[in-house]
Image: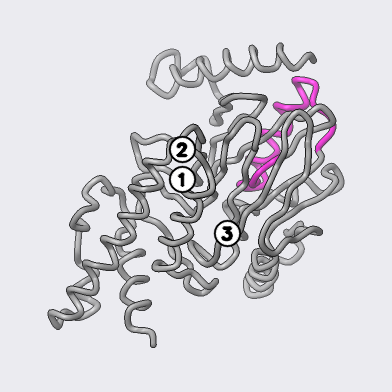
Amino acid sequence: MHRRTFLQNTALTFGAMTLAQKGILSSLFEDPWKITMLRNDVGIFEERGGTIAFLLSKKGVVFVDSQFPDQSKHLLDELKKRGEKEFELLINTHHHGDHSGGNITFKGIVDHVMAHENSLINQQKTAVINKSEDKQLYPDLTYTDTWQKRYRPDIVSLHYYGAGHTNGDSFVHFEHANIVHCGDLVFNRRHPFVDRTAGANMKSWMEVLNKALAKFDKETMYVFGHAGAGYKVTGTADDLNQFRDYLGNVLKFVEGEIKAGKTKEEVLKTTIIPGGEEWKTDGIKRPLEAAWDELNTK
């Protein structure tokens, strides 16, 4: 199918799904996923797990993250219906199962899987612990600091700026479209999971976001791994600034509570982070506990 037709059909599907989500004509639409074309042949897929991005290059499709097996199959089936048959590259922003669990669906049909070198190590360790090695498709390509390759009409580049959500998170930049997938380096108005078992560090995370803001420009569109209820998984540099400040507010609050002699149990009873009132979703204990442990680790 011609690429322009794919974009038109996808836009129509997206519009219908939006109505369905609002409860209008919901009985007519059974598909639980949503595909949104952003710009320059780059789109996103939302269903269950971290947001998937994809580039419709001239030779085939480049994917960023894979959610879970069923979800990846839904996306692949939808792309095949629209004439996409070649799948060139699958990039994992990091190793967590809601971003890499669907890798196995790509076995035998994608040319390569890629991630930061630490992400591969983390995925292998996690699979051994969970005894799920047979359910993995590991990256066969890794990088250390930066990586870049042309996938016409775009150029895809990966950037690693240090420990954040884990010690292996990548920013994925579709350079011509000027769209950056942040993976879980940004939770848009949603309390984040801070995976200290995989090298996460909240102070470093703030610096990682500063480096990203310095690297990309004011016209950059960002894709986030997750968003709170009522918020989008796409946004601007302002959302990165807001999330960086949120992390700082969590650390400042917990540090103050420690100095005041509060116990960890008392701190974990907090319901609102001062300065982070927009973060109202469940899961507030995750960053609070991570900040407590980080601040008490010498």
In the rendered view, does 138 fall on the left or right side of 191?
right
Task: Tell me, for residue 233, which label it has, or none.
Answer: 2
CB contact under 8 Å: marks 1 and 2: yes
Please state, as top left, top right, bottom left or bottom right, where the C terminus lies in the image.
Answer: bottom left
| Front in this rendered view, residue 136 or 274 | 274
Give me the C-alpha separation between circle 1 and circle 2: 6 Å
Residue occupying the point 30% across, 55% down: 246
Residue type for callout 1: His
Report whether 103 appears left or right of 288: right
Between the C-alphas of marks 1 and 3, the distance is 14 Å
Distance from Cα at disc 2 to Cα at disc 3:
17 Å
Give the residue at x 40% y 14%. Answer: 24
Q: Which residue is mark 3?
A: 169
Residue 268 appears at what percent x and percent y? 24, 69
Q: Which residues are magenta?
A: 63-87
Q: Earlier in the sequence, mark 1 or mark 3?
A: 3
Q: Tag 1's secondary structure? A: strand
Please identify the quarter of the rendering in which residue 52 is found. Answer: top right
Q: Position of residue 231 (x, y in %)?
A: 36, 36
Mark 3, secondary structure of its residue: loop
Q: Mark 2 belongs to which amino acid?
A: Val
Above/below status of 204 relative to 68: below
- Any mark on residue 226, and which? 1
* Residue visible at 54% across and 49% down in the picture: 183
